[in-house]
C-alpha cells in the first residue's frame, strides 16, 4: 500500500481568483517541496485549534498547489479559510492527508465522479493519470446545479480531445433548453451508462449526502466496496 506521511509546510499565497459567484481558485507556492499522493487533501492551519480541510486540485507533479473552494456569503468554514489566505502572504498547511488516493498498482478501468467543488479531488487524480498513465481508461463525471457551475468544463473537454482513453461527462440538475448533455443526479448518470460497476475502480467526491447515496446505489449496481474510494466514507 502506498504511504505518505503528513507534512507541515509553509506556502506563499500567489492568487485567489473567483471563477463563479461562489467558487474561488487558490494558487499556493510551497516554500519546501511537498510530498503527497494524487487524491489526498490538506488542512489550512488557521491556528492550533482551527484547521480546515480542502481537496487538492493539482497533482503531485505541479509546482503550485491549487485549491477550488466553494463559499457563499454565509458559509463560515470555507469563507474563514479564504479570508485567512487573503490576509496572510504565507500560510501553514498540513498536507498528505486522506486514504482515497489513486491506486497506482490497479489495472481496472476508472470512474471519477465529482459533485460541485468535489471536482478538485477528481481533477488531481485525472491529471496524475494523464501525465503518467495515459493508457488507462478513465471516465470523468462532473455534476453541478447548472451549466455555469461547471467552471472547468473547457479544460476537461480539451483533455478528452487530447486523449482517446479519457472521457468527460458533464451532468447538470437544472438544464436550459440549450443544454444537450446529461441531466439529473450525477451518480444516476454513471449507473445509466454502465450495466454494472463491478469491473471499475470508482473515485468520488462531493457533499457527504451525495457520497452516502452513491455508495449505497453503486454497491447495488455491482460495485465492489473495496474498489470505491472517497474520504467522505470515513465520516459517514
Image (tube, rainbow, N blue to C red):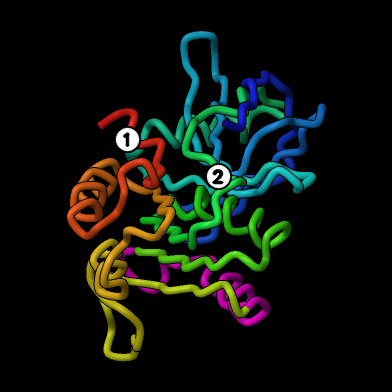
**Residue 233 disc label:** 1
Measuring from the top left, give residue 16's x and y in whole percent. Answer: 63, 47
Name above or below for residue 85 compared with residue 16: above
Magenta stretch, residue numbers: 144-163
Name above or below for residue 14 compared with residue 34: below
Measuring from the top left, give residue 22's x and y in whole percent. Answer: 42, 53
Say which label, 1 or 2, has the lower sequence index: 2
| Depth check, front residue: 22 or 152 | 152
Q: Is 150 one of the magenta-colored residues?
A: yes
Residue at the image point whose x is 31% and y is 72% from the top: 194
Measuring from the top left, give residue 83's x and y in whole percent. Answer: 54, 33
- Circle 2 packing at 10 Å, graded few (<14), some (14-19), many (20+), is some
Left or right of 156, for residue 146: left
In the rendered image, is residue 71 in sight?
A: yes
Residue hosting label 2:
103
Helix, strand or loop at label 2? It is loop
Helix, strand or loop at label 1? It is helix
**Residue 109 disc label:** none
Instruction: List the single residue furthest toward the top.
Output: 48
Amino acid at each position: 500500500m502506498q504511504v505518505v506521511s503528513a507534512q507541515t509546510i509553509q506556502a506563499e499565497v500567489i492568487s485567489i481568483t473567483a471563477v463563479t459567484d461562489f467558487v474561488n481558485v487558490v494558487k499556493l507556492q510551497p516554500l519546501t517541496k511537498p510530498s503527497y499522493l494524487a487524491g489526498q487533501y490538506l488542512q489550512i492551519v488557521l491556528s492550533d485549534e482551527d484547521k480546515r480541510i480542502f481537496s487538492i486540485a493539482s497533482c503531485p507533479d505541479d509546482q503550485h498547489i491549487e485549491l477550488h473552494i466553494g463559499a457563499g456569503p454565509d458559509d463560515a468554514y470555507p469563507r474563514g479559510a479564504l479570508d485567512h489566505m487573503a490576509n496572510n502572504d504565507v500560510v501553514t498547511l498540513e498536507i498528505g492527508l486522506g486514504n482515497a488516493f489513486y491506486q497506482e498498482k490497479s489495472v481496472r478501468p476508472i470512474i471519477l465522479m465529482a459533485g460541485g467543488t468535489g471536482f478538485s479531488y477528481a481533477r488531481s487524480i485525472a491529471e496524475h493519470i494523464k501525465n503518467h498513465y495515459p493508457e488507462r481508461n478513465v471516465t470523468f463525471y462532473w455534476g453541478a446545479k447548472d451549466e455555469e457551475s461547471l467552471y472547468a468544463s473547457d479544460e476537461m473537454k480539451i483533455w478528452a480531445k487530447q486523449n482517446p482513453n479519457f472521457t468527460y461527462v458533464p451532468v447538470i440538475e437544472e438544464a436550459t433548453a440549450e443544454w444537450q448533455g446529461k441531466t439529473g443526479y450525477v451518480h444516476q448518470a454513471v449507473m445509466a451508462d454502465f450495466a454494472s460497476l463491478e469491473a471499475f475502480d470508482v473515485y468520488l467526491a462531493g457533499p457527504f449526502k451525495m457520497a452516502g447515496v452513491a455508495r449505497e446505489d453503486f454497491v447495488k449496481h455491482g460495485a465492489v466496496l473495496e474498489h470505491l474510494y472517497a474520504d467522505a466514507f470515513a465520516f459517514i
